[in-house]
Amino acid sequence: MRNFFQSLGSVIFTLYLFLSLPAYAVISLLTAPFPHRVTYVVGRHWAKTVLFLLKALCSLDYVVEGQQHLPKKNTVVLLKHSSTFEALAQVLIFPKQTWVIKKELMWAPFLGWALPLYKPIAINRRAGRTATEQVIEEGQQRLNEGLWVMIFPEGTRVASGESKRYGLGGALLAAAAGRPIVPVAHNAGKFWPRRSWIKQPGTITIRIGPPISTEGLSPKDITNQVREWIESAVTKINTSMEVGNSDHKLNTSA
């Protein structure tokens, strides 16, 4: 019976996620004559409603560790990407921001119509050097506007426990702008797997790491440091979760 209600809650949540997007996209379009901050409030409110219902319907919450590491000045953030969750949660966790996204999202009905108002950096992932140059140029513009630039260095969602090559775009942007990189790890993929309607109950851990300096380092060295920190942190989070689950089972058995 518990699995039935978990599945039912997950389905209702997913329906809200898909059906609410067009409504909020239209509201975002109505804010076009107003300053960017007005549009941003709409997007942030949508993310807030989604995560509220995620907790209410799926019993899936999250905690954030390491917020003391966030620098006072806006910078570049590189996040592990294993779920839809972090694409939403980042809007609530970090200050006003924009995102490096795949250009295909701009062609989606409703979402693609509203996205330009949020000043994303929409790249063609097959464009290679041209896409990297776009990230550097537009990324510096966004940083100069006071926005944080959020990047998924693997370029796409990766199943929990897996890893792909990290692109150099984030490191090149941060180095060009003279900013550090903030690495972020989490275990969202364990609870909200990609392409899955069913969400597992529990608490997602989001861990923000100390800023990684880009001064005097090559883009490859910067990226390797970021990758090493993120992948190590993900492993530690997952190990801690497994130990916690084992202790819970032992206590329950006792």
Image (cartoon, rainbow, N blue to C red):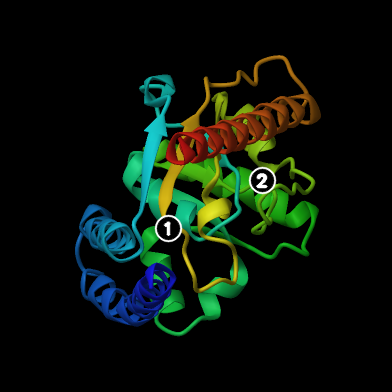
Residue 39, given in percent of the width and then of the height, sits at 26, 61
Near-viewer residue (38 or 197): 197
Which quadrant: the N terminus? bottom left
Q: Residues within 10 Å of mark 1 (few under 14, many from 20)?
A: some
**Residue 5, relative to residue 155: is it above or below?**
below
The amino acid type, in three-letter code, at marker 1 is Lys
Determine the residue located farthest toward the front in the rendered image: 254
Camera-near label (1 vs 2) is 2
For label 2, the residue is: 153
Is residue 44 rendered to the left or right of residue 201? left
Is residue 126 rendered to the left or right of residue 209? right
**Residue 44, relative to residue 239: is it above or below?**
below
Residue 207, given in percent of the width and then of the height, sits at 49, 32
Q: Residue at x 68, y 56 (%)?
A: 159
The amino acid type, in three-letter code, at marker 2 is Pro
Q: Residue at x 48, y 51 (%)?
A: 86
Which quadrant: the C terminus? top left
Numbered circle sitting on residue 232: none
Q: Residue at x 79, y 56 (%)?
A: 128
For label 1, the residue is: 119
**Residue 20, relative to residue 164: is it above or below?**
below
Near-viewer residue (205 or 46): 205
SS type, badge 1: loop
Residue 83, given in percent of the width and then of the height, sits at 55, 58
Q: Residue at x 40, y 78 (%)?
A: 11
Near-viewer residue (5 or 184): 5
SS type, badge 2: loop
